[in-house]
Amino acid sequence: MVTVIVLVLLVVGAFVVWRIINDHVLPTVQEATDQFTSFSDVPPGPCYDLETEGGLLADWSEVSCTGERQVEVSFAAQFEDGAFPGDDYLDREAEETCTAAFESYVGIPEEQSVYRLDWIVPTEDTWAIGDRQGVCLVVSEDGQALSGTVKGSER
């Protein structure tokens, strides 16, 4: 019974994340390019504060990228349709893409920055319902709130 409840909560949480990304994040972020040549034209963010409970997204709110918040979106892309490629594949692709996006967005490589990268990719359950979105996030290295846009900050 407990296993069923945990699985239901995971599916519901993944669906909520998928809806947030699909409805709110992706429409405000320029479509992916292979060369990252147009980042100078992309406005900062969007930026969000996220609230989790037990590892699941419980609430979120879009906030100004000039004030304090938890994450700033640096890039969004769509994975190709097909069979679920696996968690390892999606994480490798996200790490490679988000690392390049981080440097283009922030202005310096992550290892030289006070910021860190993170990403959200589909799970097997959200893939089954059509989720193909990957989102790259910039977060604080020390877990503190971000303040002011990180785009082009070279920090």
Image (tube, rainbow, N blue to C red):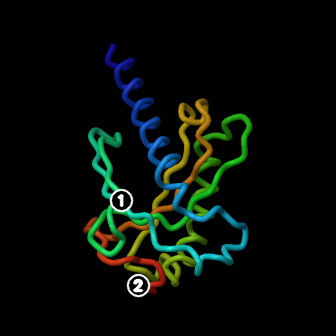
Which tag is nearer the camera, tag 2 or tag 1?
Answer: 1
Point 62% across, 35% down: residue: 130
Q: Quadrant of residue 17?
A: top left
Note whether 128 is above or below 33 in the view shown: above
Report the front residue among 31 and 112. 31
Report which quarter residue 30 is drawn in. bottom right
Furthest residue toward bottom = 154
Name the residue: 37% across, 79% down: 114
- Of 45 and 143, nearer the camera is 45
Measured as percent of width and height from the top left, residue 55 is found at 33, 42
Residue at 50% from the left image edge and 74% from the top image edge: 43
Label number found at residue 48: 1
Residue 84 falls left or right of residue 124? right
Residue type highlighted by circle 1? Tyr
Q: Residue at x 59, y 57 (%)?
A: 94
Q: Tell which circle, 2 or 1, labels the residue nearer the N-terminal end.
A: 1
Q: Quadrant of the C terminus?
A: bottom left
